[in-house]
């Protein structure tokens, strides 16, 4: 997937002169300080934001079929239904035939380790459980591209590991994952390649091992050292 984007809010550029390709393979991890443009980039890749100029292309075509992409927002909202009901809703929205939904609900809840909570009202689940449920909902679309915005933000180490394991499992099945995180340890654990954004611009896009061992830009070195502020 190729994203070339310039997004202005009034006069202010939120993403500027950005051009990057997401290729098949291990997850691409977006990093950068607060306000760098990570969420904006993910929303643009999902087709949720009008681009001031530029394009998002998929396999050379102008747009992906919408059901080949799914996004998990920074703060997912749960429907006032059971955990299973939330997944059922997502399956219906994705056009999965009614007869197949029960089996898919079971499979998706098992994938995210929530099979025991199927009947529990989603809004009563803990933050970490809700995050995993939101991931199951995103996967209901059977996406080829899965966009995750800080999927483990404010989760404890065990819940974070659960999310990372799911990301690995999903990526191993051939789903392209693009995710943002503020957790450099997580970026090291999951990333095939790293994209560093700063003030709406792309500073680096390099294989993860190289990014952490020999960051090219001074901003990247500062970011890794925890010194790059907005
Ligand atoms: N619709 C909008 N109108 C004006 N400014 C916006 C709009 N959306 C985002 N911004 C600004 O664009 C910048 C990038 O925001 P974005 O949410 O993409 O950052 P981020 O990298 O996800 O940050 P964080 O790590 O805090 O989640 C911020 O300064 C934000 O305030
Ligand atoms: Mg964000």
Image (tube, helix red, strand yellow):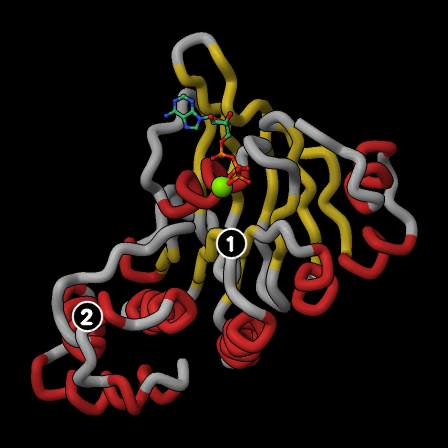
Q: Residue at x 77, y 56 (%)?
A: 207
Residue 175 percent across, percent down from the top left: 48, 70
Name the element at disc 2.
helix
Query: Which sits in the foreground, 118 or 38?
Result: 118
Question: At 30% across and 72% down in the image, what residue appears?
Answer: 125
Crowd band around label 2 with a 10 angstrom C-alpha radius: few (<14), some (14–19), many (20+): many
Residue at numbered disc 1: 150
- Give me the C-alpha separation between circle 2 and circle 1: 21 Å
Query: Which comes before the other along the chain, label 2 or label 1?
Result: 2
Name the foreground residue: 60 vs 36.
36
Q: Dot 1, how many residues are within 10 Å of its Cα: few (below 14), some (14-19), or many (20+)?
A: many
Q: Mark 1 CB in 8 Å range of ligand 2?
A: yes
Quadrant of the rendered image containing residue 117: bottom left
Q: Secondary structure at mark 1?
A: loop
Counting from the top left corner in percent of width and height, residue 85 is at: 14, 75
Q: Is residue 145 visible?
A: yes
Q: Which mark is residue 158?
A: none
What is the residue that sits farthest to the left in this orientation? Answer: 98
Q: Which residue is mark 2?
A: 86
- Left-right relation of 31 to 94: right
Seen from this angle, which residue lies furthest top? 11
Q: Residue at x 26, y 89 (%)?
A: 106
Give above or below for 28 relative to 49.
below
Does 19 sit left or right of 115 as displayed? right
């Amino acid at each position: 997937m190729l994203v070339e984007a310039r997004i202005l809010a009034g006069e202010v550029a939120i993403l500027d002169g950005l051009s990057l390709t997401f290729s098949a393979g291990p997850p691409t991890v977006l990093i950068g300080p607060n306000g760098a443009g990570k969420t904006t980039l993910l929303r643009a890749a999902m087709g949720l934001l009008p681009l001031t100029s530029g394009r998002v292309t998929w396999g050379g075509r102008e747009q992906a079929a919408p059901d080949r992409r799914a996004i998990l927002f920074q703060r997912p909202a749960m429907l006032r239904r059971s955990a299973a009901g939330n997944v059922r809703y997502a399956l219906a929205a994705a056009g999965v035939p009614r007869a197949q939904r029960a089996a898919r609900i079971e499979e998706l809840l098992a994938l995210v380790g929530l099979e025991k909570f199927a009947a529990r009202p989603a809004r009563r689940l803990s933050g970490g459980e809700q995050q995993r449920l939101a991931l199951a909902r995103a996967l209901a679309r059977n996406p080829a591209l899965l966009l995750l915005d800080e999927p483990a933000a404010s989760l404890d180490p065990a819940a974070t590991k659960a999310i990372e394991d799911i990301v690995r499992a999903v990526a191993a099945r051939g789903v392209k994952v693009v995710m943002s995180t503020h957790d450099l340890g997580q970026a090291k654990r999951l990333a095939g390649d790293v994209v560093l954004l700063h003030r709406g611009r792309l500073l680096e896009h390099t294989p993860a091992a190289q990014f952490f061992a020999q960051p090219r830009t001074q901003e990247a070195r500062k970011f890794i050292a925890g010194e790059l502020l907005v």
